[in-house]
Amino acid sequence: MINDTNFPKAADEYAKCVSPYFNIEDKQEKYKADKLFKRLRRKVGHAIGDYGMIEENDRILVCMSGGKDSYVLLDMLMSLKRSAPINFELIPVHIDSNFPNAPEYLLEDHLKKVGLEYHFLKRPVYDICKEKIADGIPYCSLCSRLRRGYLYSFAREIGANKVALGHHKDDCLATFFLNIFYSGMMKAMPPVLRNDKDDLTVIRPLIYCRERDLITLSKIKNYPVLPKGLCGFGEDQQRSAMNKMIKQWDKEYPKRADIVFKALKNVAPSHLLDKELFDFTKISNGPKVK
């Protein structure tokens, strides 16, 4: 690795020692932690390369939710930036949604140590949800749309052209099965996506990473993870069911989740039923029945 002249000095120092290798004394634990970090870093690098996520002079808004995934995302991008052959800028941003008793200071204290210029945006997400949604009904859908809208708006304000999210392989699989079981649609989380206005690109650099590895690294690094369920509803129940199904597979059929993910990259349109993807009428020379 080399020093990145586009990094502030404090950020370069943080990124230089971002592997847990530098903070563990036991040799065996040091080796295992560094091996995990390098494996995740390699997967992130492959995902970025496979899908062209990052290009020269990108200004990337890194979404910091305060969950384990966002901490890992920022660390991986900072580590890769030090050795990347191109220049790009990382801008950590957190939406303070005004949820009661949220310990936002934990995340801010961490970002101060990271050394990058960061932004905390106070937005009335919780207040709008309470106003628009009846008591007892989960806020998940509206909350997600509001936060995404605020992030996109701020990205435009500061001239960022990309938005990095911390979704991982398990998130992608859960979304795939949610769409199959509840929407009758074969759709997952794409690694790269243009927004509806076609002026921002959403990227998911952790798309090749399993959640269990992110959990392990988060515990090793002792990230100050913000608590879930501050809204009072906890995790979306349908998504939670998909996550439980995937975790059960990991116990009973350890390779199944990875095989299903591989299938998302290996699609045969002619062996499905979507007429928009494949023109089945050209297979036969017989009469066309209307």
Image (cartoon, grey):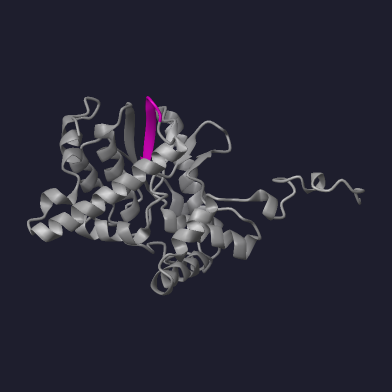
Residue 76 appears anywhere in the view: yes
Residue nearest the observer in this picture, 144 or 127: 144
Residue nearest the observer in this picture, 214 or 142: 214
Residue at left 31%, top 56%?
214
Would you identify the image quadrant in which residue 47 lies? top left
Residues shaded magenta: 55-62
Up/down of 1 relative to 109, above or below: above
Up/down of 109 relative to 194, above or below: below
Find residue 183 and report its horizontal and vertical position in percent: 64, 60
In this rendering, position of residue 250 left or right of residue 219:
right
In this rendering, position of residue 248 left or right of residue 35:
right
Residue at left 36%, top 50%?
65
Q: Residue furthest left?
A: 25
Find residue 181 and report its horizontal and vertical position in percent: 61, 65
Q: How many marks?
A: 0
Q: The N terminus is located in which quarter?
A: top left
Q: Residue furthest bottom?
A: 252
Find residue 156 and report its horizontal and vertical position in percent: 46, 31
Magenta stretch, main secondary structure class: strand
Residue at left 9%, top 57%?
27
Q: Residue furthest front?
A: 285
Residue 139 appears anywhere in the view: no
The reply to whether the magenta stretch includes residue 83 is no
Find residue 89 and report its horizontal and vertical position in percent: 32, 30
